[in-house]
């Protein structure tokens, strides 16, 4: 698993953010929206990403500690409206499916 082998070691000194920082870094700015979406997509009822994958990465201590910090940071989640994100991705997936069916 890429997260375990390549990303988690980079988070070993996270306090709670990349490079031992107590404040968000460019690493979080570039990745936080992706990370919180993965967790959203795996929620029961949403089921757009395998729950088993989230459970597996949740056992990677460095990763999960960092992901937890992202999930509660106001700058990351302040404008994140989970329901809108899910509706938006479902619409995009439906559009893609319709386009593929038409072709």
Image (tube, rainbow, N blue to C red):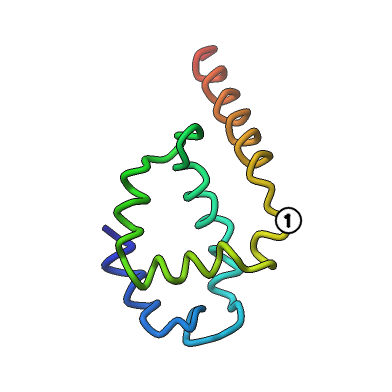
Q: Quadrant of residue 47?
A: top left
Specify whether 55 is left or right of 85: left
What quarter of the picture does the N terminus occupy? bottom left
Classify 98 as above or below 26: above
Residue 30 is situated, as x and y percent measured from the top left of the image, at: 57, 66
Q: Left or right of 72: which side holds 67?
A: left
Query: Which residue shows up at 58% across the image and 78% down it?
Result: 25
Q: From the top left corner, tell me how far across and down residue 103 is, in percent.
A: 51, 14
What count of labels does the image hold? 1
Decide: is 86 above or below 68: above
Rendering quarter of residue 50: top left
- From the image, tell me which residue sits under label 1: 79
Q: Residue at x 42, y 40 (%)?
A: 49
Decide which of 51, 29 is in the foreground and name it: 51
Q: Quadrant of residue 92?
A: top right
Q: Which residue is found at the position 33% from the left and 63% from the top?
A: 3
Q: Residue 40's x, y, as percent?
A: 52, 46
Neighbor class of circle 1 (other Cα within 10 Å; few <14, some 14-19, many 20+) is: few
Label 1 sits on a secondary structure element that is loop
Point 51% across, 78% down: residue:
17
Tell whether 60 sits left or right of 23.
left
- Which residue is most to the top? 102
Left or right: 45 in relation to 53: right
Indicate the position of residue 52 as horizontal and vertical percent values.
31, 44
Q: Nearer the viewer, residue 59 or 17?
A: 59
């Amino acid at each position: 698993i890429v997260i375990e082998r390549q990303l988690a070691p980079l988070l070993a000194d996270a306090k709670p953010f990349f490079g031992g920082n107590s404040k968000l870094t460019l690493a979080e700015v570039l990745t936080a929206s992706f990370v919180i979406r993965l967790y959203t997509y795996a929620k029961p009822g949403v089921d757009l990403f395998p729950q088993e994958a989230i459970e597996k990465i949740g056992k990677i201590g460095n990763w999960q500690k960092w992901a937890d910090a992202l999930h509660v940071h106001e700058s990351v989640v302040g404008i994140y409206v989970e329901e809108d994100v899910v509706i938006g991705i479902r619409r995009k997936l439906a559009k893609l499916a319709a386009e593929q069916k038409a072709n």
